[in-house]
Each structure stands twice: as C-alpha cells, then as structure tokens.
Image (cartoon, rainbow, N blue to C red):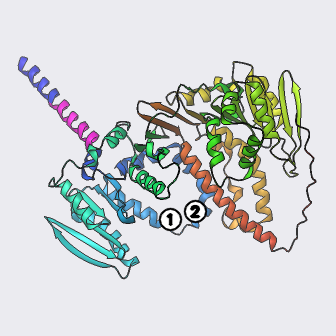
Amino acid sequence: MKRVLLLVIIGAVAAFGGWYVWNLSQKTSSAYVSVLLPRETIFVAHMPDFNQTRDQWHHSDIYLLYREPAVQDFLRKPLANFSKRDTASQTLREIEQLDPKNAFFALTSIDNNSPKVVGGFRFQGSVAEAERVVGKWRSKLLENNPGAKREKLQYERHEIELVTATPFTLATAYDRPWFFAATDLTELKGLLDHADRRAKNPMEILDTDEAYRAAVSRRPSNYAVFFYLQPKTFAKRLAALRAAIQSSAANQRTMLEQVRSISGVTRFENGKINDLLFLGMPKLEQDVALTRSSLTLGTKETFFYLSMLLNLGEKIETLNQAAGIGGMVQKILQSFFNSGITSDDWKAAFGAELGSLADWPSSAHWPSLLLTLPVLDSAKAGKVVEAVARTDQGATWTQTEKDGVRYFSMQSPGSLIAITPTIALSNRILIAGFNPVSVEEAVKRSGGTASELADSPTYKGAERLLPAPTNFFSYVDTALLYSRLDAALRPMLLMAAAFMPAMTKSVDLGKLPSPEVITKHLSPIVSSQRYDRDGYVAESIGPVTLDQSVIGLAIFSGIGAATRQKAGAGLAGWGASPTINPQPTLTPSPTP
C-alpha cells in the first residue's frame, strides 16, 4: 500500500514538474526574442502564436459580425472589387502551414538615416518544409525586381541567402527551428551569433535594458501582439536640432525626452479586443484627481461620455507663443489678450476636468453634443465667456439669465443646418452646446446626484471591465449609436443611390443589413487611463478599441471625402451654376 502511495506521489510530482517546465517555457518564449536583439533596439513587435491569435480573432465579436450571412451578402459586391483578396488568403494559408511562433519584427538602428530591420519566427517541421513556403516568397521578390542579384554565403555553420536590389538588401538564414531575415548582412550575423550563444558581448541585449524590462513588466502573460518603442534615439535628434537652430527652449526637456519607453499589447478577452498602452515617464499632474462629476448630465439616450484632465489654462501661454495657429483658436486667444485674460485667470476660473457628452434621442434627427468645465470662480469665468462672445465681430450674441444661470447664445448664419451655439454659466459648472434646449436641460440635471447613464446596466457593465481611471475615461455605446445612425442615414443613402445609379456598381444598398443584425454583436467601447508607479497606463476594451475606432473613422472620412469629390465632379458636369446668396452683415450686440 505504501509503495503504491509512493508511486502516486512520484507520478504527481513528475506531472507537476512537466507542467511547470512547459508553462515556464511559454512565459519565457518572448524573453528569448529579446535575447536575440541588441540593447539599442528602437522598435520591436512580437506575436507569440500566429495560429492561436487567428483562432481568437475568429471568435471575436467583430469577426462574428463580419460572418453574419446578411453582412456577407451585403459585402459580396464591394469585396469583389478587390483583386488581391485571393492572394492575401493564399498567403495566410501558407503562414498557417508554417505554424509560426514568436514571430518578431524589429528596427535595430537608423544610423546615417539608413534603417536596419530584422525579423524572424520559429517554425514547425523541417527546414525543407519551411523553405517550400519561404522560397516562394523569395521568388516573388526576385520576380518583382528583375535586376536583383542572388547569392549564397557561408557563415559559421549557416547558409545565408543574400538578395541585393540596390539600394535594398535582404539576407535570410535558417537556424532550426528559427528562420531569420534582415535588411543588413551584419545585423543577420548578429542574430545568428546571439541564437548560437557566441556573441562577443552577450549582455548587450535588449533583455538587459531597464526601460524594456519596465515595459515588459506591464505586459499580461497572455497576449496576441506586443510592441515596444524606445524614443531615446528620436529625442536625441530633436535635442540636437534645437541646439543647432539655437532655440530658446534648447535647455528645456520636451515631452518626448521625458518618455523612457512606449509599449502596447493587444489581446482577445471573451470575444472583445483589449488594448493596453504604457508610457514610462514622470507624472505630469500634481494633486489632481478625475472625479467624473459631469456624469450626472448623462441620460438613457447618452451614447458618448468623456472625462479627462486637461488644464487649458496651462496651455494658453504656449498657444500664444506657437506659430502657425489660425482660425477660431487664434481669434479666441487674441480676444483673451485684448481682454487682459491670462493663464492664471483661466486656472482661477475653471477646474482641470473637461467633460463631454452626446445624446441622441430616437425622436431627433441628429445628436446633441455638450462640453463641460467645473467653475471655481463664477465672476472670472464670466469674463472668459464674455471674451469668447467678442471673438467674432460679425456674430450677435444674446444674454439671458434664468434661475441664477447666465445663458449666452449665438444664432448661426448657416441656412442648411441651423445651430445655435449656447453657453450656460452657473456658479458650479459651464456647459456649452449647439442647442439651447439641450443645454438648459443639462443645467437642470447638473443640480442632482443621480444619473440615468451611471445607473444603466450597460454603462455599469462596461465600467467594471477596466481599473478606475485617474486621468482619462471614455464610454461609447456602439449599439445605440449604430441604431441612431441607421435610422438617420439609411433613407439618405437609398435616395443617393436613386440619384446616382453608378453607386450600385460598387454596393447594393438594398441589401444593407437590418440594425438588429449588427447591434447584437456590438458592446460598449470603454477606455481608461491612470498613472501607476512609473508611468501612464491606458486601456481600452470593446468590439474594437478606442484607438482602432479612431483610425477606422479617419479611413472612412478619407473615403467619404474622395466620394464627395467624385460626386461634386459629376454635378459640375451637368453644367449647373449654383447661386450663392451673400450673408448679411451682422452687427454685434453690446457686451453684456
């Protein structure tokens, strides 16, 4: 009996030891990449497991939305216009065959304005099996560069393939189970030396850099993609440039020079995408905490909420000295100067927390946007608002007072979309918006403590996903936003298709999926930022993250601008000559 018990214990210890070794190897696999790279590496991106990441992507909310039959039916015609779609799919299948682990891409140097890039990955199977795929990629490179030269070199026990197409060079080599590539032969040899542990300076590796290790300490154990950027090289160049031009700020450290490292992680979590960004740098704010006091203005129709620390008073002097600022910002700054308003006056008048909300009731055609600032001194705040009202000499501002709150309103000269910029100023808060009704309703809500938005299950569930913020917080109800956009834009798009039949060649708007098909895959996007120990940590989670949505919005805006240009050219071809009615000159009202 004792012998059986002893065997069971030995088996359990062996199993635990095997599990521990396997788990340790998984955790240290990315560290091995940092052992291959030189200490002065400027940028590195790392993907631990390509196939696992792709599988997680296929289970994400946004991919499941893409695979909806109604969405696929709608996208069939637009995607048919992309001739390289099959080529991309074939490349992905080839990568899957390699089952790459610890794939990395790094910028190791930019000396003499010549960037040196290295990369590599671990592969499954034999070198011959990997070469069947890699060799195909190398052949395509040679086909696209007819004048390229190809040669084989021997280095230690490795065979290096060198492709030269001036000024481009690509050197590749196998060190099973690794495949390495570099745009510089010396850099590739350095990779091989570190991999074979014969480097002359074995400790001059990225893994020994303090800034890199601090960044890695913020990285979760399970992630899809990781990147690290060392801004020291760029900061030195910026300092040298300031010294060369004998700038008055040559002895002052810029924001970039204060940043020790920048790193980021993307991972998948229960179908959602989670981004984490870390900036290793000193804390900028002192004794200021984010309160999210403007949250009381939120309603059940609020789809966007933002709260951030942004002391505009500290920026006034900088903006006044900055060259090239034009438009309304310059006019406001000039009005402040004419009124004798300084940065100290602004800081005495307003708190540092900027709030913003957007509501979109189902009965409204368009959303209403609000901006808020806490008021510290209502008298000084009133002088600031009066200076803003005097910015445009051709505009007429009216002032009223109701229940101790001063309202400043300006009628927009626009005729297509009539807006009435309105500023409400109480002894507690400043609220600005484009609609006097929405501003007045927000003022009424500002006196309470309850909030329809804060009490909603959707907001509460999203807020709990991230740590409490100290600097920045944002919330976007993507399902509510899409529902309102669909109701507002679908009729306009269908009408546009009727007047511009050429649109139907690219897209069939009659197959646009119903909002219910889309919104069932949409959850809120929530983002927070905090200062933790030695740097700022920003996190975002949702079907897409805040950064990804901003980038996507920028791309769609560019596509929309190009479409409007084509449409404008088409309208101009009709020979129509539009008549422009001159706007009447407005007499400014006396300063309140």
**Measured along the vertical axis of the image, is residue 423 above or below residue 81?**
above
| 78 relative position to 268: left or right | right
**Measured along the vertical axis of the image, is residue 87 above or below residue 235?**
below
Q: Position of residue 479 (x, y in %)?
A: 64, 39
Residue furthest left in the image? 3
The residue identified by callout 1 is: 85
| 185 relative position to 533: left or right | left
Q: Quadrant of residue 576?
A: bottom right
Q: Position of residue 330 (x, y in %)?
A: 72, 49
The residue carrying pointer 2 sits among few (fewer than 14), some (14 to 19) or many (20 or more) residues within 10 Å by Cα, namely: few
What residue is at 20 percent from the left and 47 percent from the top? 203
Amino acid carrying mark 2 in the image: Leu
Amino acid carrying mark 1 in the image: Arg
Q: Position of residue 251 (x, y in %)?
A: 46, 46
What residue is at 92 percent from the left and 49 percent from the top? 586
The reply to whether the C-beta atoms of the residues labelled 1 and 2 are less than 8 Å apart is yes
Quick one: quadrant of the C terminus?
top right
* Closest to the observer, 541 or 69: 541
Q: Total of numbered circles in the picture? A: 2
Residue 91 shown in magenta: no
Q: Quadrant of residue 134?
A: bottom left
Q: Secondary structure at mark 1?
A: helix
Q: Residues under labels 1 and 2: Cα distance?
A: 8 Å
Residue 19 shown in magenta: yes
Magenta stretch bounds: 14-29
* Closest to the observer, 450 or 26: 450
The residue carrying pointer 1 sits among few (fewer than 14), some (14 to 19) or many (20 or more) residues within 10 Å by Cα, namely: few
Evaluate whether residue 377 shows in this view.
yes
What residue is at 88 percent from the left and 26 percent from the top? 401
* Dominant secondary structure, magenta: helix
Evaluate whether residue 476 shows in this view.
no
Specify the label residue 79 is tagged with: 2
